[in-house]
Image (cartoon, rainbow, N blue to C red):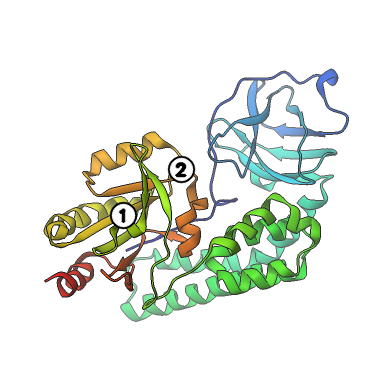
Amino acid sequence: MKKLYILPFSFLLLTGGCAEKKITASNIPFDGFVLKGTAKGFADSTLLYLEDADNSKTNKPLDSAFVINERFELSGKIEEPSQQFILKTKDLSNYRFIWLENKSVSFEGEKGKFRDATVLGSVTENENNELNTLMLSVRRSQDSISNKLEEKGLTKIERAELNGKLQSLYQEEEQRYISFVRNNPASIVSAHLLEVFSSTWGRETTEELFGSFSEANKASKYGALISNYLRLNKDPKMGEQFADFTQETVDGKQVTLSDYKGKVVLLEFWASWCGPCRLENPNLVKTYNNYKDKGFEVVAISLDVKRDNWVKAIEKDGLTWVHVSELNGNKNTAALIYGINGIPDNFLIAKDGTIVGRNLRGEQLNERLAELLN
């Protein structure tokens, strides 16, 4: 079963519209930022949007501007010393992630090559470029092996060897990220990285790296999120007792996990946008129908951010078990408590509250339930 990993930064593209705003010299804040850019190859009146790269829930642009004579100008003010944005066309055919500070920044890009645009004037953007340079060789190697794996006629041995090399490269990529964070404790890019990967790297590594951060980084919005992860995370293991939490159902009822102690509970982490989750749902429906009258319950925690998508997926897939969510994506409290870094994922909890399985699917789950309930 393929798992979708939760990477809510430059790996996740944000979409949305906005009310168009005309930029003039009179409304450029003197203590904010001005982003002046060249956009070669774009037709006049092409709209460019500037959105907060971290705010996937509202998708509300900070500013927008028309391209006129291959030039544009955007402005605004940010509360943080530095903040990551996405500059994009409406259809996302062209986009570029940019770190901005409250100063003048220049942008030089070209249609079809927006991600390779040159950005000058932002110290944080320079730091991010250093990170990208550090990661370039390992990413190219990953792409090369991934392309080879797409070739036909590979033997099982050849495919296994390539997969082994790819996994080693993923591990090297992780170590390079960790090395960057460790060597740049005062960079907001490091704080951003650690916030994104905290549940992947685990509590011990996160605590160590966070402890070396500058006071400014600890006080940043990313620092606050990392602190929240460290406060909440229990990362319960096999053989340990479940960690309790309370969340809201679709109809607004407060549900606590311990309400179901005395039953065998599958704690299922999923989302409407998760393809592998949705593919597995028919199998879980069959399992649930077979065992629900024998003391089995599913408590599903959605990592959705949009209520309508969540509710429609429940109805369409015929999921009749308990559903809860905070509609805040991977910041879901239960996901932080249990150290979830990719979905689908689940924990099987016995009647006495002991965790007796993780990420069980299909026949593996059926066999374990048969042992516990028959």
Q: Which amino acid does label 2 sit on?
A: Leu
Mark before the other along the chain sequence, 1 or 2? 1
Q: Which of 42 and 195 is in front in this view?
A: 195
Q: Residue at x 14, y 54 (%)?
A: 289
- Above or below residue 54? Residue 230 is below
The quarter of the picture where the N terminus appears is bottom left
- Using the rendered view, name the quadrant where residue 365 is placed: bottom left
In the rendering, which numbered label is found on residue 61? none
In the rendering, which numbered label is found on residue 299? 1
- Using the rendered view, name the quadrant where residue 367 is placed: bottom left
- Above or below residue 175? Residue 96 is above
Q: In this figure, which residue is indicated by the disc labeled 2?
A: 327
Q: Nearer the viewer, residue 181 or 308?
A: 308
Direction from residue 357 to residue 168 in the image, left or right: right
Name, please, the residue furthest toward the right: 30
The quarter of the picture where the C terminus appears is bottom left
Task: Determine the secondary structure under disc 1.
Answer: strand
